[in-house]
Amino acid sequence: MPHLTVRAPEARLTGNESALITALTEAVVGVYGEWARDIVVVHLDGVPRGRWGIGGKPADDAAPSITFGIREAALTRPGGSETAARLVAAVTDAVADVLGEQVRSATSVELVATAEGRSGLGGAITG
C-alpha cells in the first residue's frame, strides 16, 4: 500500500484537508494506475505554531515534508528510477496545486522503500 504522511504547519492544512487527500491520491493513481486508488493511505499531520524550525529558527510558514512509504520492489525493478521521479514530481505538483505554488521549491518528498517481508497488516507479515 502506498502510504503518504504529510507534515505541514497546521495553518497550511486547515481548510485544505479534503482537497489535499484527493490530490495526493490522484497523484499516486496517475503514476501507478487506477488499481492503486483503493489502497492509497494519506495521513495529514499538522504541526502547531512554534513547533517547526529550520536553521534554528521557528518556521511557521514552512513547506510540507512528505514521507512516501513504498515497496522496495517498485524502485528496484526495471524503470524504478523513472517511477521514483514520477512519484516525486506528481506528489509535489499535488501539494503545490492545493497549498499554492509558493511551497513547490521547498516541498520535500522522501521515498522510504520497504523490503519484502518487512511490513505487516493485521498482525501478519505481508509480501
Image (cartoon, rainbow, N blue to C red):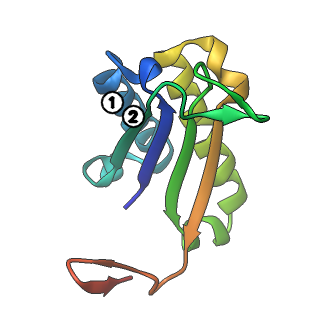
Q: For numbered disc 1, what is the local secondary structure?
A: helix
Q: Nearer the viewer, residue 112 or 46?
A: 46
CB-based contact (under 8 Å), mark 2 and mark 1: yes
Side of 110 relative to 125 (left or right): right
- Which residue is denoted by mark 1 in the rendering? 22
User: What residue is shown at x 61% (from left), y 56% (from top)?
Assistant: 111
Q: Position of residue 63 (x, y in %)?
A: 61, 26
Pick the residue in front: 115 or 31.
Answer: 115
Which amino acid type corresponds to the residue marked 2 in the rendered image? Glu
Give the vertical position of 118 relative to 24 (above or below): below
Residue plotted at (35% across, 19% down): 14
Percent coordinates x, y for residue 90 in the rendering:
56, 35
In this figure, what is the number of numbered marks?
2
* Front residue of this view, candidates 98 and 7: 7
Q: Residue furthest right?
A: 55
Picture quarter with the C terminus: bottom left
User: For numbered disc 2, what is the local secondary structure?
Assistant: helix
Residue type at mark 1 is Thr
Residue 37 drawn at (x, y percent): 30, 46
Picture disc at residue 99: none
The residue indicated by pointer 2 is 26
Give the quadrant of residue 115.
bottom right
